[in-house]
Image: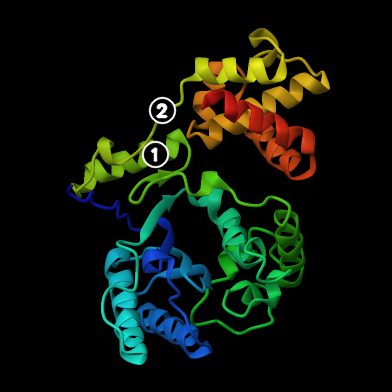
Amino acid sequence: MARRPRIEIEGGLYHIIARGNNRQLIFGSDEDYHKLLRLLEAQKSRLPFYLYAYCLMPNHIHLLAERRDDPIGRIMHRVLTGYSQYHNRRYQRIGHLFQGRYKAILCQTDQYLAELVRYIHLNPVRAKMVSRPHDYQYSSHKAYLGLEDRGKLVDVDPVLRRFSARKRVAREMYQKFIHAGMKLGHQDELYRAAPGNVLGSDEFVDSVIHRIGETGKRGSRAHVRKSSDVNMNTLVRAVEIAAGIGREELCGSGKAPGVVMAREALLFVGRDAGATCAELARYTGLDISVVSRRFESARRRIAESSQMKALVRNVKKQLE
């Protein structure tokens, strides 16, 4: 089966994930982690790009990078090839170290930049390797706190400025943002796009399609997933059964606690299955800003409420 070309856009924000072949370890010592970081820094000086976050886990890598002039594909090829050659020499092995092609998801910057920085830095906490993100050595989290100088490698200022123009205040607010994220757990929606696909609003996806068409690069609508395959009627019916609440109430403006919870479950499961906020808004008749707020509320509620967790599980069971 032919591989689809990746979408490469100058100024694009990419969440990059590279995994060890068959989930094998790719780092066996401190020196291995430092080698990968040196390779990243070397390529950053030769083929400039912005690196907003990294986390090197024992069997996979997360990077959040913004492309400048040179393609992400060229940068990652040099980094991963260089590391594979080093690893194979050191451990006297042959064969592929990494599992196929790395995943690169083009993300909407204004919506996902800070969210992805947080998600990447919390990987070791979710994996129960540490209880606090700053206890993990091989991520860029401590650079954001000013506890580690990664000035040549990590570009922290564009992210911190989103919290405050004053560096000290920005770091404090960033810490609170990270702490709040520790309750969220795994966020499937940040992985939903397949390699070469796009994560963002309908408007963002449209702008990507337009730019690809204008530049004549390889890519087309077939390579950008704009709409989901969610059957909204089936989804609403599943929530009706799971919550015992009718469609009119689910898609209405009622404020009863049970109705609000069921509506949030509908939006959460819909987004988790691939529907955009715009699609859910069109179908439910809710304003898109309401859908977005309720989805964020649902994520927080799932982290705190066993009742909400059970409802979401029941909805998903109805969809099986």
Mark 1 against mark 2, which lies toward the viewer? 2
Kind of residue at badge 1: Val
- Residue 71 shows in the view: no
Q: Position of residue 131 (x, y in %)?
A: 74, 69
At 60% from the left edge and 54% from the top edge, which residue is drawn?
115
Say which label, 1 or 2, has the lower sequence index: 1
At 50% from the left edge and 19% from the top edge, which residue is drawn?
232
Answer with left or right where residue 67 lies relative to residue 258.
left
At 60% from the left edge and 85% from the top edge, which residue is drawn?
149
Residue 157, placed above or below residue 300: below
Label 1: element kind: helix
At 79% from the left edge and 43% from the top edge, which residue is drawn?
304
Q: Residue furthest right?
A: 256
In the image, which disc is placed on residue 229? 2
Between 72 and 275, the residue placed more toward the observer is: 275
In the image, which disc is placed on residue 205? 1
Residue 243, placed above or below residue 90: above
Q: Position of residue 110 (x, y in %)?
A: 54, 49
